[in-house]
Image: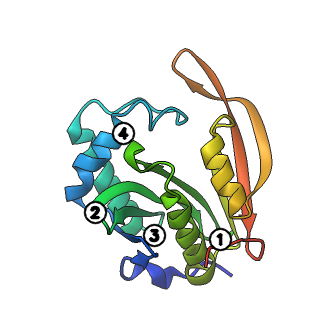
Amino acid sequence: MPTNLAVFEQFPVLKTERLTLREIQLTDAEAIFGMRASGRVNRFIARQNMQDPEDALKLVEKTRKAFNMQMAIGWAGLYRAEQSIIGTCGFNAIDHDNMRAEIGGEMAVDYWGKHLALEAVAAIVQFGFEQLGLHSIEAKVDPGNRGAIALMEALGFQKEAHYKDRICFGNGFRDMAVYTLIKGNERLMQ
């Protein structure tokens, strides 16, 4: 039984107490560039800091294309109190046949510590299980990223694997941990 492809007919907008999660737009490229150019945001992500604002536009176009091809869903998080983009989050890859998706995201440094990421991820997880029809969601994280791990564990994700020297980045290798949440085991925020 594959996932519910009807969710791709129109981009799903999600609302939480403080956030609106909507489709990433070309006008979000400047905010995305600001996050991805930041060494702090990328500290636990094996990717180079963005050097050119044009790269952010290409990323937005790639994200929108992936949605249109039913391969991924990327949301921009809008903090309604300030009407500002605070980050992006979503299903980076969806395995429809196995009803499994990989979740990932990033948040601007100014919004760290306010539990906004927890609020966003909880809404996306709920959407994944209830609307998309997923059976499991996984997150690949740097084992040193205590904030991301605490967020995953708060929602019921469990560590499934720890790969040594999994990612070649820069002048060395980095470990990667995989946290998974099976439908029915989630602890969603009310």
Colouring used for the render: rainbow
Residue 32: x, y in percent?
31, 47
Residue 19: x, y in percent?
40, 69
Question: Alpha carbon of mark 3 to alpha carbon of mark 4: how far?
Answer: 25 Å
Q: Is residue 33 visible?
A: yes
Residue 99 found in image quarter: bottom right
* Residue indicated by mark 4: 36
Amino acid type at mark 2: Glu
- Which callout, 3 or 2, points to the residue nearer the camera? 2
Amino acid type at mark 3: Gln
Residue 92: x, y in percent?
51, 56
Horizontal side of residue 134 vs 31, given as left or right: right
Horizontal side of residue 22 vs 178, given as left or right: left
Q: Residues within 10 Å of mark 2 (few under 14, many from 20)?
A: few
Question: Alpha carbon of mark 1 to alpha carbon of mark 4: how far?
Answer: 32 Å
Label placed on residue 82: 2
Give the residue drawn at x 41%, y 43%.
Answer: 109
Give the residue drawn at x 60%, y 78%.
Answer: 3
Residue 142: x, y in percent?
64, 37
* Residue indicated by mark 3: 70
* Residue nearest the viewer, comparing 86 with 169: 86
Question: Alpha carbon of mark 3 to alpha carbon of mark 2: how far?
Answer: 31 Å
* Residue nearest the viewer, comparing 69 with 86: 86
Amino acid type at mark 4: Arg
Q: Secondary structure at mark 4?
A: helix
Label placed on residue 97: 1
Q: First in sequence: mark 1 or mark 4?
A: 4
Q: Residues within 10 Å of mark 3 (few under 14, many from 20)?
A: some
Residue 84 to residue 178: above or below? below
Q: Secondary structure at mark 1?
A: loop
